[in-house]
């Protein structure tokens, strides 16, 4: 009987397997499913990282300094690409110059000094510069009001950890003169391999969830097309009993700050459920964002007022099972009728939005009807 031979899987092989799977996840679930400038940049970043992982494996088995240097360079330039992709995704300016410098300069610097006495110093400088990009990445994810704090937190924490480790590594190099260069490089390679697994895993989950959660929250694009078609038909039949309602949750930023991400999600889900349940079955409600619903409704003024009161009443009832006790939600509603704004859906929507702004400025928890003054910006 042939004895079983144990399979030894080291950290390098694990890194290659993990990065390969994560690259497939990001490209399949983000880049191909939601092709934008940001997701394309992220797909390229993971592709470069995967190439670096395979070169890392080749360098590990051959021991060639050039392969090891090239793999290290491709692995660390993953961070600047993710950073610039995050800025693009959030609609901020995209300073490509430092990223291009990193993409070209890091591989050239490491490969050209591979096998020389300068390599360790250059590697530490590269690691510190990538730590700066990691710190910038964490800042971009956490600045302002991130759309989903629990989604961005894994990558933000991993980026902060990368930045801290790069600083500690650079500081330790200054006081470890008695340690041989090969020993220091061996420790750095092991640290890089573990760091690549951690950062790429956190990045993959954060970026995929960020793209898909925000895409789901943007609402159904077809709802606006259906509303336009219904209004065109109503205009052809001279049916003037049509209105657009702009329903907005009051103080969403305060609610988000006062609760955890899961608790805020429950508040938002209840808000949308309350709006749906207070409307007749013939009304079309489009979930524009977490704190906003646009409704196309047919009915007399008296009937619409009844539904407006029902919406405000349902939203303002305190949920006894709410995760944050004592939180009372409210809404501001703008109401635009076809008799005032006509049958153009965009004009109705703009008028309702202006009326909703007036309702919120008046203190919220009320509705305002669009008047001729609300049509001026349309």
Image (cartoon, rainbow, N blue to C red):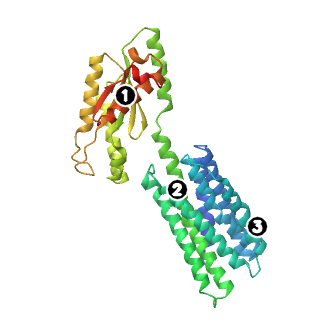
Closer to viewer: mark 2 or mark 3: 2
> Residue 142, position in %: x, y?
47, 57
Kindly identify which residue carries mark 1. Answer: 355
Q: CA distance from mark 1 to mark 2?
A: 34 Å
For this orientation, the residue located farthest to the top is 237
Can you see residue 291?
yes
Q: Residue at x 58, y 73 (%)?
A: 166
N-term mark: 1 or 2: 2
Q: Is residue 288 above or below residue 319?
A: above
Q: Which mark is residue 216?
A: none
Closer to viewer: mark 1 or mark 2: 1
Q: Is residue 161 above or below residue 156?
A: below
For this orientation, the residue located farthest to the right is 112
Q: Which element is circle 1 on? A: helix
N-term mark: 2 or 3: 3
Circles 1, 2 touching at the beta carbon (< 8 Å): no
Circles 1, 3 touching at the beta carbon (< 8 Å): no
Q: Which element is circle 3 on? A: helix
Which quadrant, please, contains the N terminus?
A: bottom right
> Residue 284, position in %: x, y?
40, 26
Q: In which quarter of the view is residue 5 placed?
A: bottom right
| Left or right: 331 in relation to 91 | left
Instruction: Give the crowd class for mark 3: few <14, some 14-19, many >=20 residues within 10 Å.
Output: some
Q: CA distance from mark 2 to mark 3?
A: 28 Å
Can you see residue 9?
no
């Amino acid at each position: 009987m042939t004895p079983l031979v144990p399979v030894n899987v080291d950290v390098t092989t694990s890194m290659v397997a993990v990065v390969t799977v994560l690259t497939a996840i990001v490209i399949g679930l983000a880049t191909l499913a939601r092709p934008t400038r940001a997701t394309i940049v992220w797909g390229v970043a993971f592709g470069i990282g995967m190439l670096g992982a395979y070169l890392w494996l080749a360098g590990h088995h051959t021991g060639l300094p050039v392969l090891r240097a090239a793999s290290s360079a491709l692995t660390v330039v993953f961070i600047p690409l993710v950073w610039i992709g995050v800025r693009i995704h959030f609609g901020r300016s995209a300073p490509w110059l430092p990223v291009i410098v990193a993409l070209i300069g890091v591989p050239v610097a490491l490969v050209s000094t591979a096998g020389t006495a300068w390599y360790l110093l250059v590697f530490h400088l590269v690691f510190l510069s990538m730590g700066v990009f990691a710190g910038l990445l964490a800042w971009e994810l956490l600045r302002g009001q991130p759309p989903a704090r629990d989604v961005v937190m894994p990558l933000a924490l991993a980026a902060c950890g990368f930045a801290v480790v790069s600083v500690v590594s650079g500081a330790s190099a200054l006081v470890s003169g008695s340690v041989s260069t090969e020993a220091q490089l061996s420790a750095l390679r092991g640290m890089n391999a573990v760091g690549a697994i951690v950062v790429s895993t956190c990045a993959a989950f954060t970026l995929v969830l960020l793209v898909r959660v925000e895409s789901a929250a943007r609402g159904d694009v077809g709802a606006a097309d259906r509303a336009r078609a219904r209004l065109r038909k109503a205009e052809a039949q001279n049916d003037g009993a049509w209105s657009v309602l702009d329903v907005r949750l009051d103080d969403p930023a305060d609610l988000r700050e006062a609760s955890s991400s899961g608790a805020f999600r429950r508040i938002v889900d209840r808000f949308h459920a309350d709006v749906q349940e207070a409307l007749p079955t013939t009304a079309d409600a489009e979930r524009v964002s977490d704190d906003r619903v646009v409704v196309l409704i047919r009915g007399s003024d008296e009937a619409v007022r009844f539904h407006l009161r029902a919406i405000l009443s349902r939203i303002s009832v305190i949920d006894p099972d709410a995760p944050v006790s004592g939180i009372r939600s409210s809404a501001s509603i703008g109401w635009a009728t076809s008799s005032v704004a006509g049958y153009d859906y965009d004009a109705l929507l703009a008028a309702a939005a202006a009326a909703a702004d007036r309702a919120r400025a008046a203190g919220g928890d009320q509705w305002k009807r669009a008047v001729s003054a609300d049509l001026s910006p349309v």
